[in-house]
Image (cartoon, rainbow, N blue to C red):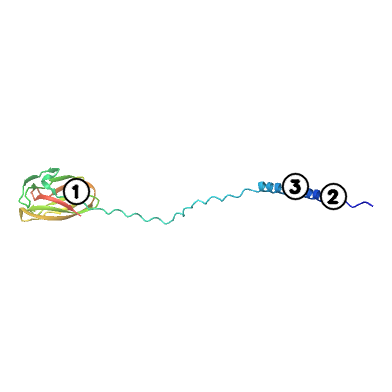
Amino acid sequence: MVPPPSPSVYRTKAHRVRQRSLIALAGLGLVLAGYGLGRWQDSPAPLTAPPAAAAVAPPASSEPSPPSPSPSLVPTIYAKLEAEAADGNVGIQAQPTEDEGGGENVGWIANGDQLRFDDVDFGPVAATKLDVRVASDAERGRMEIRLDSAEGPAAGTLNVTRTGGWQKWRTDQVDIEPTTGKHTVFLVFVRDDGNEFVNLNWLQFVH
């Protein structure tokens, strides 16, 4: 009859079994750790956020934009044009005047005589009338206002009438074609005969 093993033998075997189990468990842990690491390395990189969409301008309106308001035009304030200070004349002479303000007027005006005023600036707002300071002791004759040429069409005509004497002054007004910009102004005097018929002191354009 074989005697039973001593308790120390069981302890030794149990110790070896535990060691082998621990080694096996450690090896399994290493395998699992390696597998997990490989899976982590093979996993795709996280997607980056897509770039923000560029701002899209709203479509242009097919409606035409309203025109910008044009600046208001400022009427020119016209100075008096003294007849004796004209830039040119034909057949006309100056003389002392008895009109208010004194100075000189031009006289002895007859058919075919002329006065010329250069570079008269009418500005952006049209002049439509002309005031003329006249004196006359005759009934017939006319003064034609012409622009840029003494032979051009009349922009306005003043029919001369008697004022009561050659130094009896009156301001007459005549309508003219609306005129803007810069022009040479001719005053052309017309009468059917050769008699003198008017004296002239000054003229002034108005709107």
* Contact, mark 1 vs mark 3 (Cβ under 8 Å): no
Dot 1: what SS?
Answer: strand
Please tell me whether mark 1 or mark 3 is closer to you in this view: 3
197 or 103: nearer the eye?
103
Spot occupied by residue 97 in the image (x, y as percentages of width and height): 5, 49
Q: Which mark is residue 26?
A: none
Q: Position of residue 181 (x, y in %)?
A: 24, 48
Measured in 3D between alpha carbons, the distance from the residue under mark 2 to the one under mark 3, in whole angstroms, is 27 Å
Residue type pointed to by label 1 = Arg
- Give how far apart the Cα atoms at labels 1 and 2 are: 148 Å
The answer to whether residue 131 of the structure is visible from this angle is yes
Residue situated furthest right in the rendering: 1
Q: Which residue is mark 1?
A: 146
| Residue identifier under label 3 | 27
- State which tag comes first along the sequence, 2 or 3: 2
Provide the residue designation for mark 2: 9
